[in-house]
Image (cartoon, rainbow, N blue to C red):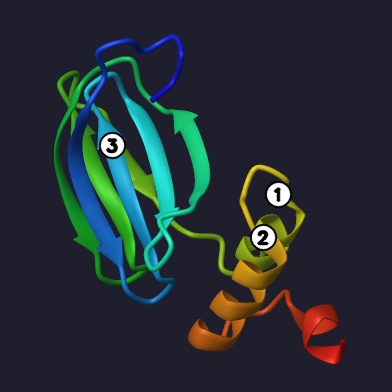
Amino acid sequence: MAADAQGDFPVLMQASPKYGVIFLMTKFGYFFMFEASTGALIYRQRITDQMPFVSVRNPSTDGMISINRAGQVHSINVDAENLIKYIAAAQHIPNNGKLSFTMASRFGLSGADDIFKS
């Protein structure tokens, strides 16, 4: 969990089978996106200062829609055109090159053209 969020814990989770990722929201409003097969943390961002209390999978985008205690609706979606490029460039993701190649080939995602040529 984040250093400034002592005592934070997960309250909501949704899977995105189309992209092979898991979305997680915490009590303190942090959003996490993990790669499902390795558990690698892909992205983390605080998106609200209110506790989210309900979420559903968005079937049209394979993302997540959540509502917090203040009534704010958050639509969280994967940017399919940039996901692989982001992972390949992210230094915080262990084995990011291998992970980006694996995800691109497994889910038919663009952005790994240079990797496939190698």
Task: Reply above or below: 44 against 9.
Answer: below
Residue 110: where, in percent of width, then height? 67, 79
> Mark 3 or mark 2, which is nearer the start of the sequence?
3
**Residue 39 in view in this figure:** yes
Gap in Å between the C-alphas at discs 3 and 1?
21 Å
Q: Is residue 90 left or right of residue 75?
A: right
Question: Mark 2 — residue?
Answer: 96
Gap in Å between the C-alphas at discs 2 and 3?
23 Å
* Other-residue count near label 1 (Cα within 10 Å), few / some / many at <14 / 14–19 / ≥20: some
The type of residue carrying mark 2 is: Asn
Q: Secondary structure at mark 2?
A: helix
Q: Secondary structure at mark 1?
A: loop
Q: Residue at x 39, y 68 (%)?
A: 37
Q: Which quadrant would residue 88 be assigned to in this image? A: bottom right
The type of residue carrying mark 1 is: Ala
Q: Is residue 6 left or right of residue 44?
A: left
The type of residue carrying mark 3 is: Met
Residue 20: where, in percent of width, then height? 40, 70
Instruction: Locate the C terminus by quadrant.
Output: bottom right
Gap in Å between the C-alphas at discs 1 and 2?
7 Å
Q: Residue at x 38, y 25 (%)?
A: 1
Residues under numbered marks 1 and 2 in contact, where contact means CB atoms less than 8 Å apart: yes
Residue 19: where, in percent of width, then height? 44, 72
Nearer to us of marks 2 and 3 is 2
* Other-residue count near label 2 (Cα within 10 Å), few / some / many at <14 / 14–19 / ≥20: some
- Residue toward you, 6 or 73: 6
> Mark 1 or mark 3, which is nearer the start of the sequence?
3
Labelled disc at residue 90: 1
Labelled disc at residue 32: none
Question: Mark 3 — residue?
Answer: 25
